[in-house]
Image (cartoon, helix red, strand yellow):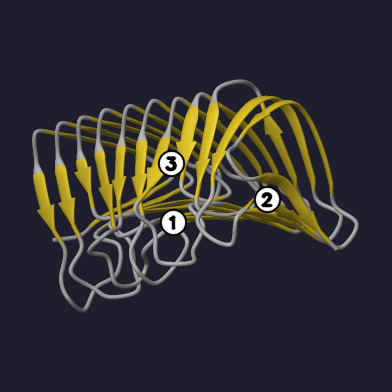
Amino acid sequence: MKEFVDRGNLILENVKIIGSARTASPVMVNSGKIILNSSTVINKAEQSYAVELKNASTGSVENCNVDGLVVIGSKVEVYDSNVYKGVFVKEQSEFVGGNTNFDFADAVDPRNIYCTDSALTLKQSSVTGDKVDNPIRAFRSELYLSEMSMMNVRDNGFALELNEGSIANISICKIRGIFAKASTVQIDGDVTVLNFLELYDKSRLTGADIRVNIAPPNYSMQVTEGSSVDLEKLNSRFSPIKSR
């Protein structure tokens, strides 16, 4: 089954859509609007997503189970749902998620939240990564993360990866590793980082209360290549910074 809307509205409630193993994105919206409520969209095709919005489309997803979303030049809000197999947000898009479980532990490809040139807001949600890739990767994007758990990522990996001028505003979160390259991390109270916190290429870490519990080697964070740290309070049983 495949649903395609071009410059129209699509309302799906209490339905189950199962895509073909040979057809990408069983639900596609082009310059239109989708309301998806209390439904399930299963995608069997590899390297694709269950729901695709593009060209100034808007979407609302609530109480659903979805095998991944791709948002291109569009805006979507996802609440009280389960999202599997990844999220791709690009080309000045906006993605808002609340009280939602993003579970990529068993995903193959795609298997993370990939945000480029867009805005990503997640609140009161959880993100679970797989053993291969970092579960949130951002490029030239702005992220707002509040009351989040971002855990169970690969060995030596990072739950949050920021690149190329990205900015992450983080509050009341528990994160298994942060990597920033030419980017900014802004902490606004009660953030715990496990495993690794590394800043490269003139990145900045600023803010208030942060707890860092780092795996060996025994330092709280690594700051390199002209990066900087300005924190009001750092709680860690290791030496504060290793820099070079």
Secondary structure of the residue carrying numbered label 3: loop
| First-in-chain label (2 vs 1) | 1
Task: Give the farthest residue toward the bottom.
Answer: 22
Distance of label 1 from label 3 (alpha carbons)? 29 Å
The amino acid on which the numbered mark 2 sits, given as a three-letter code, is Met
- Disc count in the image? 3
Label 3 near label 2: C-beta < 8 Å? no
Distance of label 2 from label 3 (alpha carbons)? 45 Å
Q: Position of residue 42 (x, y in %)?
A: 16, 57
Above or below, 157 against 84 in this view is below
Residue under pointer 1:
135
- Quadrant assignment for the C terminus: bottom right
Q: Quadrant of residue 224?
A: bottom right
Residue under pointer 2:
221
Residue under pointer 3:
32
Q: Is residue 145 visible?
A: yes
Mark 3: give few (<14), some (14-19) or many (20+) Cα within 10 Å. Answer: many
The amino acid on which the numbered mark 3 sits, given as a three-letter code, is Gly
Q: Is residue 114 visible?
A: no
Query: On the picture, is 142 further left or further right than 242?
Result: left
Q: Position of residue 36 (x, y in %)?
A: 25, 35
The amino acid on which the numbered mark 1 sits, given as a three-letter code, is Pro
Depth check: 42 or 158 in front? 158
